[in-house]
Each structure stands twice: as structure tokens, then as C-alpha cells.
Image (tube, helix red, strand yellow):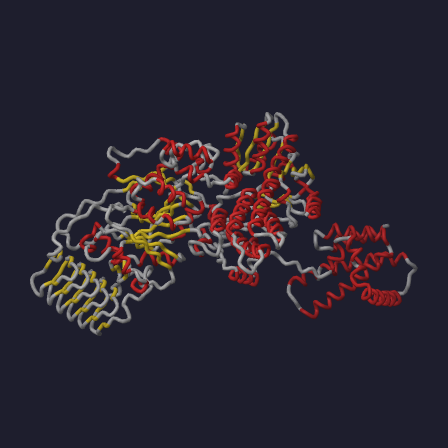
Amino acid sequence: MELQAVLMAAGGGSRMMELTYNTHKPLLPVGNKPLIWYPLNLLERVGFEEVIIITTKDVQKMLTPDRLKLDGKMKLDVVCIQLEGEMGTADALRHVQQKIKTDVLVLSCDLITDVALHEVVDLFRAHNASMAMLMSKLHEFTETVPGQKGKKKAGEQRDFVGVDATGQRLLFMANEADLEDGLTIRKSIMCKHPSMRIRTGLLDAHLYCLKRCVVDFLVENKNISSIRGELIPYLVRKQFSKSVNLPNNKDEVEMSQKMEGQTNLEILGSCKDEELLRLTQERSCWNDHHGDMSEAYHGGKVRCYVHIMEDGVCYRVNTLAAYIEANRMVSAPKLIEDPPIHPSAVISECTQVGADSIIGASCQISDKTSIKRSTVGASSTVREKVKITNSILMNGVTVEEGCNIQGSVICSNAVIGRNADIKYCLVGSSQRIEPDGEQRVLEYYHGSSQGKICHLEPMTV
Amino acid sequence: MADADETSKQAERNTNVGDGIAVKKQDIARAKNEGKELTKDEKQRLRKEKKQQKKNKKDDKGESEHENVPLPPSQAVVQCQSQKVCTSEKPAKSKAEQRAERRARQEADRAAKGKKGESAQQPPSGKSKAPPNELQPVVKRLPEHVQVDDPAAVRKLAKKLERQQIPVRSEYGYKVSLFSHLHQYSRKAPLTQQISIPSTVIHPYIVRLGLQYSQGIVAGSNARSIALLHAFQKVIQDYKTPPNEELSRDLVNKLKPYISYLNQCRPLSASMGNAIKYVKKEISNIPCLCKEEEAKKQLLSCIDNYIKEKITLAATTISAYAIEKISNGDVILVYGCSSLVNHILCDAFDKKRKFSVIVVDSRPRLEGREALRRLVKKGICCTYVLISAVSYILPEVSKVFLGAHALLANGYVMSRVGTSQIALVAKAYNVPVLVCCETYKFCERVQTDSFVSNELDDPDDLMVTRKGKIHLENWQDIRQLGLLNLVYDVTPPDFVDLVITDLGMIPCTSVPVVLRVKNVDQ
């Protein structure tokens, strides 16, 4: 077996609590499919036959194949973890370490993309890399985010990503938060790669191919708790650290390990390096760089590669703005093969349903309604003379006559009273908007039982 | 014997096939020496010709028959003329009587042949290998990889790949008409696009290897063979015999789709072909009663031994021989990056010989940079030029060392494109050319030109960026423009002075002898 897929679905969606307080993040409907459907579909399309899904108990109950609407025969192996402590993604990976027997492809459940996965995996295979990841150009979200009054929160801190001249080898990775007094690049890196491109407008898709020895290394080093936050920067730095003089026999290796107290990644990786591979590289007339006197890869054993998608769809649905953008984008035919209007929906004749709208199953759309650039969830009812533009309606929503909904998100089982005029509002789950009344703009309606929206500590996912 | 001379000249004029000239000369020589015995042979040949011509008229088949038809008539002319020579020496008979005599003899011979069967043919065919075989309709099957412009062959290949569940790689770009019978692929469309990502049909190591071949990460005949054998070791390690099968037969069948896959990624080299033959032979020689673990261990050690003997030790032997040819004060010219030549030069430097090296390089691969790096790192004085400057620097060169991709059975050297150019110019300047090649790269193919069988690399490699602009960016839009990126060429044995192999230093024309000795050994 070549690769095993691990899907991380235990995140709480702490940056969009308005949506996730009632519905778990993996099950949020995007384009009328649960969010977790998208990475699973990606894996299935490419040819994976088994996936290990790490999630919480509540989500596990909902992850049955018909709920997930998966057509293929992919086997889902769901593993539960307790969410009491702070469990980072690396901790989760350590939890399933027993099941991992080969190299692993780690995905996040909130990734919606149409990337050609072979580009990432080919980098991993061809260069025998320790890690290969996917990044994409960051799209600015221009739509008004409903329910948030006041200025937009300051943008998340940028990531500085340094790649070499070919654009594939990852040389440097740091978050703005960690760079207090400026960006420092070690001289050893500059000596080996004199031409480096540093990019800031990149979105990390959280799709990583990791070698088996990296997983073993994680098991040994329990102080690493997040893949993105700690493991990846460690691997990127490790590419250029001075290589330890490898002792020749295994006893010496164990001795030195005990002395160091921390298992060296290189020793774990290079014991497997074989004589023949070294001989092949020696006889091959290929080098990945030209102009200095070192051999291919500068003799380094740890190599990190990145595939940067210049165009195509790639979203991480972890904020409200991203959620809305993703709903717009998935109506693009590349991702969903089903027709946008579900066959079981009942749409009467005098309605205008735009081509870029998605209507879920068993909907009832009455006369003289106009639905443009919107998503209507399953089993929703829309009465007469309703105008819905740029909005997202989740499952089981009832919209009475004469409403005008613009740019809003209506969560599941909500009821919008007659003649309500809603603009850029976020209506929580099972809420009811009173009929008539003035135009409501940028309001967030949530049940009184919820109280204030509390922001949990962001999970380092 | 003026008549014999005349016939020999006419024979030369009549024959169309170049290879046949040597054979015809043999014929004529024998006509002078053997006399009566040959007439029987001639009669047999004539009979076969007539049979074949009848077959041609009956079947109206394709080209292969037509190709053979021009051959026999020319030979028929030769035979008739040599016969005329013989009969003119006898007392003159009338033509009709001669024809009747001949027919009677043929009938008798035919009857006799029916009784004897093939045994009569064996001794004469053993003596003269070429003549009887030439006249039999020899339908040699062309390998598939040089028949890309023939839709029937392409369909056959597609069917075979479908059976083995290997995807077909699609051709790329406009092919220059002279080379339209060869595959041309793009590096940006790897075969991994079409297989599932955790590859189940093809072993992961083979997928990785194919990717490394197609992207050029593993390049060079020796490196490719070692990588291939390493991947085979992994496949054998992971192999489990299915319940009702035998390891010796099933494992070979398992390897066949992998070999097709690797062939699709990059056409196999001659050295790889020989390595595969060896591995298949070893697998089929495993006794049936052998347990799986033992069999696997045995195969793994066989592969290790093969690499050790044929590649590593061979390199040591060759460099021991080659050192005798390097003297102090030599200026040695090398072309591109040959692992063997680099090894020889490094060894010679270690043994305190004083020499300097000129590295010749060519686009688009620019492999000479890597050779330059390795030699300079060792401490050898090097000069670097491009191939266009070869005739300027040759007056300063005392020897030329070339590496080879394969040595063909007629003594031609197949190597990186540009090698024959260097050999030609070196010959013009009377500089000795030494080719270094291990015996496992000797191949039974015969080729006299670089067109028939070659490899076309990605044409986009020829595009170069100057001052931020790529002039050939839209070369596909210009209909009359074709980009050709050849990989190999063949050097005739006249330009090569010596071949240094692990069996010793031999002239180029002794390659068939080595092949014969190898076959007898095995």
C-alpha cells in the first residue's frame, strides 16, 4: 500500500461559532452537501479505497454513508477522540498511530478543492520527500459578511512562505506572529539556495503527505501537538540543520538517542536509506541545482516540497466569510456532478430560479418567487412572492410570503415571518423572525439560551 | 577468372540491400571454390524462390512480402549468372536440353528432400549462416515502440496495455516526419495522472521509479539499471504467492505489467533489457519445491550479485584497464556525463596520473555540468566547452574517452546524441577514440543509422528563456514548425579505435564474439 488517508474532522470551527454552535463543522451544509463530503469526494475521485476519519462522538453518529451521500465504495474508518483536553492534530495523528502502516496523507475536513492531487503526491514520490503540501493563492473575500456589525476584524496574520527558484522546494515557513523583530533567514539556507522567493498571499490548504518515519518521530516526541503550527515548521527548518554524523551500527544509534533524549528525525529516516539508492544517485547525472559543488539535494536527507495552485478552486471553510464564498463557488460544475436543482424539488411555474442557484431535495418553491445566486437547503418551503438573493438557506427553513432576503444566512429549521425584509443577517438555528417590521440589516439572531457568542481558544488546526 | 569478376561486380550493382554485400561476396567466393556442391544449394534456393513467388501471387499480402520480393530477384540474378559461369565452363549444350536437365535434377532433389527432411539443410545452413535464411520469407516483427505511425500496431499496444490495466500515455506535439514512428511525450503530462493515487495495480516503488525516469531524476544507463533492480528487489520482497500458483511462473507474470508501465514512462534502455532478461531467467529457474522465503532470498541475492559483478566490479576492472591508456601530460576529452568515464578519471587521478580534462557539453540536457562538478570536486583540471567548439579544441586533445548507452551487434556504438559527431571530428584529427562500456550493455540489435530506433524527448525542453522572454513559447501554433529533441545516436565502428570492457580491450567489431561467448556461458 502506498498512502493512507487521514481526515481530521474533530475541529470545533471556533472561528465561526455562529454557525457551529448548533451544527458541527463537518456537517455544515455547503451547496446542500455536508462539508465533509468535499474532501471525501476528492479522495474517492482520485482512487482511495479507505479513509481514517478522526472526529468526535457526536459527529460519528451522523457519519453514515447515506447521510454522506457518497456514491462509491470507500470504506470509512471512524475513530473518536475526546475533546476534553486541547487535542491538536498531531496528537490526533499519534492517537491513530497503530493504524498507520505506510506514508500518510493528512487532510482537513474543511477543505474544498478541485486540485489534481497527483501533482502533490508526485512531488512526494519523485523526490522521496519527507513532506509535501498543498498551498493556493489566497482569494480576498469581497462579500459583506452577514451578522457582523462594525469593522471587519483585522485580517489573520500572514504566513511567510519561502520557495526556491523552481517554486517547488519549501525553504522557509513562518507566521507573522512568530516574527517579532523581522524576518531572519539563516546563512546556510542562502548559501545553498541563493535565489528564494518569499510569498505572503498563500493559503495553506492543510493537505500534507507525510512519510512514515515522520509519524514515528511524532510518536517519540510528544511535545509536538499541532501539525501545522509545530511539525511543518520543524521539518522545514530541519532540512538545513547540520546533519548529525551518522553512527554506523545500530547500538551506537540507540546510545546516542538516549543521550540526546530526543529522537533525531534523520537517524530514523536514514536507517532505511539503502545502499542501492545511494549508488543510484551517485551514478545518475541529475542534480536539482547548478552552480555549486554539492551533490543533488545538497546531501540533505529531509526534503519538503510544496505545490502551489495558481488557479482552481481551493477554500478552507473555517470562517463565515469563507463559508459564504464556498457556497457560491461550489455551484461551479467542477466540484458537484449533481444537477443544481434536485429532481425531487417542487418548483412551480412562475418562479425564477437562477442558473447559479442550488435547490435541495424535497423543496417547495411557490409562485412568483425569485431565487438568485442562492442555496436553498433540503425540505425547505418558500412561499409566494419571495425574493431571495445571494443567500444561504439551510435545511428545513420556512419562508413565508412576501419576504425579501438578501445576502443572509438562515440556519436550519428557522422560520422567516411574512413580509420580513432581511439584509445581511445571520439567523440562527430554529429562530423565528417576526413578520413585517422594518428592514433588518446586519443582525445576528440567536436564541436567548445561547447568550453571548463566546469565542473558545482557537484550535491550532 | 574475368567472368567471375564480372559477375561479382554485377552482383554488387544489382543488390539493393547494403548489408547483403558482404554476404554476396561470400557467395561468389564460394562459387569459385565449391563448384558442383553449390549448384545443389542453388537449386534449393531457386525452388524456394519460386515457392515464395507463388505464395506472393496467391496471398497478395502486405509489405513484408514485397520487401522480400525485390531481394530474391536480385539474388536470383546472381545465382543465374553464377550458374551461367559454371555451365559455360562445361561443354556447351543447347538451352532446352539444359533446362530439361535442370528440371529433372530439381524433381529428383525434391523427392530426395521429402525423405531426408530438414537434416540436409542443417549442415549447409550451419556453415553459411546468412544465405539460406535470406531466401526464406523472413517476417521479422518490428518492435512496437518504432511503429507509432502504424495505427494497427498502436491499437495492438493499446489492447495489451488495457489487459494489463496500465494507462496509455498520449502523444504530444507535432512530430518531425522522419521520426513520426517514435513516441513523443510531454513531461507535464505524467502517467501518474491516469492511475489511482494509492496505486494498487502497480507496486508503489515502480510508480516512483517511473516518475523518476520520466522526470529525468534517474538518468544514465547504469543508474537506471541499478534503480530498476532495486525496485525489483522491493517487488520480490512484497510478493506473496497466490494459493494455486507457482512462484517461478506467477512472479514473471507479475513483473510484465510493471515493465510495460516503465516502458510507457520512458523507453527501456538496452542495459535495462538485459537486466530484465537476467531476472526473468533467474525466476524461472527457481525449483518448484523451493519454499517462498528461500526463493525470495535467493532472488534477492542474485540481484545483488548481478549488480556487484556487472556494474560495480566491472567499473573497477575497466578503470584498471583504462589507466594503462592514460599517461602523464594527457589532455582527455569527455562528452556529457558518463558515470563510467567519470569513475575512470577519478580513479586515475587517485593513482597520481597527471592529466587534464576537457568536458564537452550540449543542449538541451547540459549534462556536462554535472560531470564538470564531479571532476573539479575531485581536483582534476578541467576545461568546459560546448559541442560547437569541438573542432577548435581538438588539436590540443590527446585522447577521447566516450561512454556508451549500448553496443550493438554490428559494432556500432549507441550513445548520447552528439557522440558520433565528436568521434567523427576526432577521427579527422587522428585523435584516438576509446569507448568504455560494460558487457551487460551489449545488445543483439543491429542498427546502422540513428533514425530507425531512437528516443524522442520532450520538445519543450528546447525552449529557453532569454531576458525573461521565451521566444518559442507558442511553437505549436506555427504549423510548419517542429521541434526535435533526440536522445541517442549511433557511431560507426570505423571511428572507434578501442572498446574497453570488463573482458578486456577489444576492437569494436568483436562485439558479436562477446555476445556469442556470453550466450554460450548462460
Left or right position of A125 against B391: left
User: Is residue A337 shown left or right of residue B261?
Assistant: left
* Image location of residue A430, percent across then percent down: 15, 62
Report the residue at 60% width, 29% height from top.
B348
A53 with respect to A449 (left or right): right
- Tell me which residue sits at (25%, 50%) in the image: A83
Can residue A190 be seen here?
Answer: no
Q: Nearer the viewer, residue B439 or B153?
A: B439
User: In this figure, what is the number of numbered marks?
Assistant: 0
Residue nearer the viewer, B459 or A352: A352
Q: Nearer the viewer, residue A8 or B96?
A: A8
Q: Quadrant of residue A31?
A: bottom left
Q: Can residue A6 be seen?
A: yes
The extreme left residue here reads: A437
Please provide percent x and percent y for residue B435.
63, 38
Q: Is residue B462 above or below residue B85?
A: above
On the picture, is B522 further left or further right than A92? right
Can you give x and y, in whole percent of width and height, for residue B114 in the image? Answer: 81, 66
Examine the rendered structure and indicate whether residue A363 appears above or below residue B85: below
The residue most toward the right is B91
- Give coordinates of residue B268: x percent, y percent: 56, 50
Q: Is residue B121 above or below residue B334?
A: below
Q: Residue furthest bottom?
A: A349
